[in-house]
Amino acid sequence: MRIARNTAATLFCVVWLFPVYWMVTTAFKPYGDILSATPRFLPFPFTLDNFVDAVTKSGFLRDLGNSVLITTTVVVTAIAVAFLAATALTRFRFPGRRGFLIGVLVVQMVPVPALVIPLFLSLKSVHLLDTFLGLGLTYVALVLPFTIWTLRGFLQGIPVELEEAAMVDGASRGTVIRRILLPLVLPGIIATSVFAFITAWNDFLFAYVIMKDQSGYTLPVWLVSFSTSTGTDYGGLIAASTLFALPVVVFFALVQRRLVEGMTAGAVKG
Amino acid sequence: MSTLQTSPPAAAATVAGAEPPPRRRRHLLLPYGLLAPAAAVLALVLGYPLVRLVLISLQDYGLRSLFTGAVGWAGLANYLTVLQSPDLGPVLVRSIGFCAALVIGTLVIGLGVALLMGGLGRRMRVAVMFALIAAWAIPNVASTLVWQWLFQPVYGVVNWLLTRVGVFGDLTQRDWTTSAFSAFALVWLLVVWQSVPFVALTLHAGLTQIPRSYYEAAAIDGAGPVRAFTTITLPFLRPILGLVTILSVIWDFTVFNQIWILTQGGPGGQTTTLGIWTFTTAFSKNSFGQGGAIAVVSVVLLVAMTAVYVRRLVRSGEAL
């Protein structure tokens, strides 16, 4: 029984890890070993040529810059906006609070691809197509429901008495938020930042539709256009994909547990 | 960062001498002020487009409107065109069938892996978790391109392996995107590979919540593993299983990138699902009105499929 289980688990690991293994090893293989009728399963001899090739390809560094710029801006903006909203939702009782929460839950259910057409046309009519502002706003909106919901959960866990004590001492609400809430909620901010980062960094569809001019491409769009324009340069393509995936994998490993909790929190607790 | 580490009493001291603010008024308006940026972005970028989507689907919005801004009302003409289109039937069957195949595949494998993880030793379990997280973490554009390479007709390693197995004959020249069935199989493998981790990890987390004593009691009463599964595991897991199913339906019904990058809806439109159809109608044929109508139909279908869940969500929201 135990042997059967371990065999099944080993088989699963091999099958599930194989694509990742193949991606990483392909990236390090010399040209001749990539395009060979008999695949080589070990990346020896080993080369960095593919990475050099990818990085020096036209547009890669520019689009990497675009991706970094837009992703960081989105993360900072979304977290700030979500933190303010979550503070309002957990520290005040006011008419419309419950309605807003339900709105956030329902908006999260909207199938994102259905929004592409109206967003494209709306951004066009306010001249925000092909601008980082247009794409950035879209990403902020996409990540807000999750970030608000998650930060709200974290803030609920912090006792209000802490803030009340400070207010008795004469601190203003602004000071309380900055000096007491913010530091205590830092782990939540890190978790939601990673989520926002991954959403903005990985997005293909919106960048593809909104950024028509090459100078505004982000990395996923660059990757896809590279794959269709030079169908056979798999070394460069896979090396570039590996570079693109790397930061996500690192961040993911850090907060994987919280992501699982966050994605299920809204529904399971209800 | 330095402000974060300042102790609260020090902060309080700096404002202690200031005049107390007009608290009542600020108290009333402050929460709205804090909420305003989030509400504005959500309303403008998610709420308004949803309304606009419905409006566009009732308009004659084509290439000319895109440049002149002049838009005429079309009434239900877009819906009639879509509903009478010979493509509609096949697209619906494909979308729903493919979604069902993805959901079933993901849930069966995901549940299997979750159950398997419970019976493994520590080291083996960590290995399985590692494999799951690795597959989950790769951005889907990257994994789609890796898929293209794995299944590449001449140099792809999958065709080579299948040929070596020998059951299917020489497959080294096989292009998976040339027939509808193999193209769907290609996308199915990719999406299932990416979706199993979330399902397996969530279900595994749920399984660890079931008290061991229940199984011990069942064993003493003479229940076999199957009986224990149906009377203990399944009832305990039901809420999480329901949630995971609904989320899978939503995600699998709206799969876009993987199909678009691998097949563009081909060959001959045979892998065109509702999402692809919406996209090509709007952005390739510049018929935004019709594309909007297809998108509205997809949203309605999705809402119908997940109605039970949405109702529960709203109810849980009311209890907040």
Image (cartoon, coloured by chain):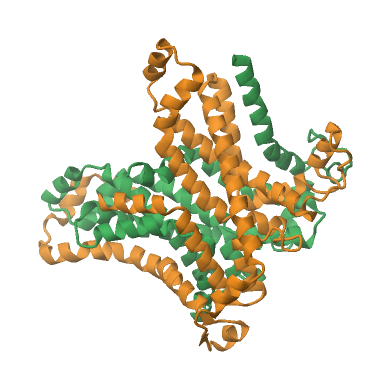
Question: Viewed as shown, does residue B320 lie left or right of B65?
Answer: left
- Specify the quadrant of the image occupied by residue A249: top right
| In-front residue for pair A106/B229 | B229
Query: In the rendering, at what x and y percent does residue A20 appear?
Result: 67, 39
| In-front residue for pair A254/B202 | B202
Q: Chain A, which colour?
A: green
Vertical comparison of B300 with B138: above or below: below
Query: In the rendering, at what x and y percent does residue A183 appear?
Result: 31, 46
| In-front residue for pair B116/A85 | B116
- Looking at the image, can residue A63 be seen? no
Question: Who's the residue at 61% across and 56% down the image?
Answer: B95
Question: Viewed as shown, does residue A224 lie left or right of A150?
Answer: right
Count how many numbered circles sit on residues in the image.
0
Question: Viewed as shown, does residue A246 lie left or right of B203?
Answer: right
- Specify the quadrant of the image occupied by residue A94: bottom left
Question: Who's the residue at 25% across and 59% down the image?
Answer: A97
Question: Viewed as shown, does residue A158 lie left or right of B60?
Answer: left
Question: Who's the residue at 62% across and 25% down the image?
Answer: A9
| In-front residue for pair B143/A76 | B143
- Looking at the image, can residue B121 be seen? yes
Question: Who's the residue at 53% across and 87% down the image?
Answer: B69
Query: In the rendering, at what x and y percent does residue A46 appear?
Result: 79, 38
Q: Chain B, which colour?
A: orange
Query: In the rendering, at what x and y percent does residue B151 appear?
Result: 77, 46
